[in-house]
Image: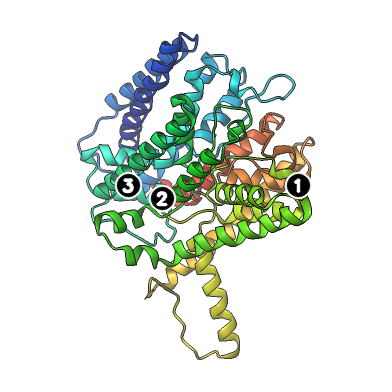
Amino acid sequence: MRIKVVLNYLGLLLTMVGIFMVIPLIWSLQHGENDSVAFFVSMIITICSGGLLWYFSRTRNAMPTLREAMLLVSLAWIIASAYAAIPYMLAGTFTSYINAYFESMSGFTTTGSSVLADAAGNATIEAQPHGILVWRSLTQWLGGMGIVMLFVAVLPQLGVGAAFMVSAEAGPGPEAVHMTERIRHSARVMLMVYIGLSIIELIALFIATDSFFHSLIITFSTMPTGGFAATNNSLIYFDSATVDGIVTFFMAAAGVNFGLYYVLLWKRSIKAFVRNRELRLYVTIILVAAVIIAVDLIVNRNYGILNAFRHSIFQTVSIQTTTGFITTDYDIWPQLSRGILLTLMMIGACAGSTGGAIKVIRVLVVERYIHRQITSSHSPHVVMPIKLAGQPVSERWVMRVLGFVALYMLVMLLFTLILSASDPSLSLESSFAAVIANLGNVGPGLAAVGPTLNYAMVSPFGKGLLSLSMLLGRLEFWPMLALTRPAFWKWR
């Protein structure tokens, strides 16, 4: 373990985060708002900290090993969020650093949970300066790509260490499609697709809303499946079927494995794209859930048919992709609809997408494993390898998936018990929904943390626990948990 190597790249990454603060600074200067000083000072602090860290940790052989990459990735998200919280404090957005850190961690992990509120607990998003709102959503856009993935795409000297870093950030789960053999080229392809879709959505929203600011904020939050908006009531503010349709399409697109876009656009293989089993299951889940919710709303809430399908499709896609935008208060929907949305929070989008939670590919593997176990119970001599894309996958891979799902459920239950026991202001339902929503990087939950409310009333300890939930969910546990093993820190 070479700490200097880790600190060296951490310094470069911090410098990059500081440079991105120029964007909200420009917005602040343009509108003559008082947060411009906060962003200028924050930018200087972040860039200088990163530059000094890089300068005093220079080393000849700077390519990270796997263990060094895992440590770097874990520290990158923690420290980047710590520095991203500085503008909130200097601008007076928050008086408590734990609130500022919660907001920045929610941004980088693309969770979308917010603690912006006044003394009475009412949301105060629209009262914030333009620069602060741009920074909130920009952190989501950076986090959606993966701050380390972005780092790999633009830094040439990583060499083979790039593969370790991307693997550590993306997690060891089953990525169904690998874009190219060269990991750095793959990162660049993903970045091109990500930027391209963002530009197209920005143009479409600007035509629909005639507001570049709102279009930019929504785009910065849609493609990373983050969910931050510039208004207290999210997309309810627009009350536009056109805006809902545009955002629904791009949320759904962001939930697809980005490797499939390489197959579709670079290899021009439509057949491989549409025959992907994970993509098919992803679309099926969305359609089935949306139809059931629409029927439930028509029967039990007297919704009109068009209105029921408009809101059911939007909220299904928003929750399934772990974006968290809302067009209505789904917390007042019937129990069946609320239960379906809660289930979708746990399932999430496709592997290799910007979405969070368990991921559809793992659900598919678990379903096939259960099917195999049922078959082997009455036919013990039958050999049934689990296949994806027509190819059998290794048993080690299957066990890793099962281990991840079991760990996900265990952490979800454990954190729910801890949160409900430590914060008397939250009911068991609210605590359960809060943990699911933050562990899955969804954002809004149910009950006290429902879609029209926020997390301002949660205790400081609870906010710390939920911040940890966001990070564990975004990094998919393994890099963080590896740091707790004594063997990880052995100097070799």
Is tag 2's residue or tag 1's residue first in the polypeptide sequence? 2
Pointer 3 or 2: first along the chain: 2
How many tags in the picture? 3
**Residue to which mark 2 is pinned:** 170
Which residue is drawn at the image coordinates 76% and 52% (left, top)? 334
Amino acid residing under circle 1: Glu
Kindly identify the amino acid type of the residue bearing the numbered disc 2.
Ala
Given residues 360 and 239, the one toward you in this image is 239
Dot 1 or dot 3: first in sequence order is 3
Circle 3 sits in a helix, a strand or a loop, which is it?
helix
Q: In terms of depth relative to the viewer, which is nearer, 182 or 116?
A: 116
Q: Secondary structure at mark 1?
A: helix
SS for callout 2:
helix
Tell me, yes or no, whether the two marked residues, 1 and 3, touch with CB atoms within 8 Å.
no
| Residue drawn 50% across the image and 60% down it | 282
- The percent coordinates of residue 326 (x first, y second) are 61, 40
Horizontally, residue 228 falls left or right of residue 454, namely: left
Q: Would you place residue 125 above or below residue 363 in this image?
A: above
Could you tell me if residue 264 is visible in this image? Answer: yes
Question: 10 Å neighbourhood of mark 1: few (<14), some, or many (≥20)?
Answer: some
For label 3, the residue is: 190
Q: Which mark is residue 173?
A: none
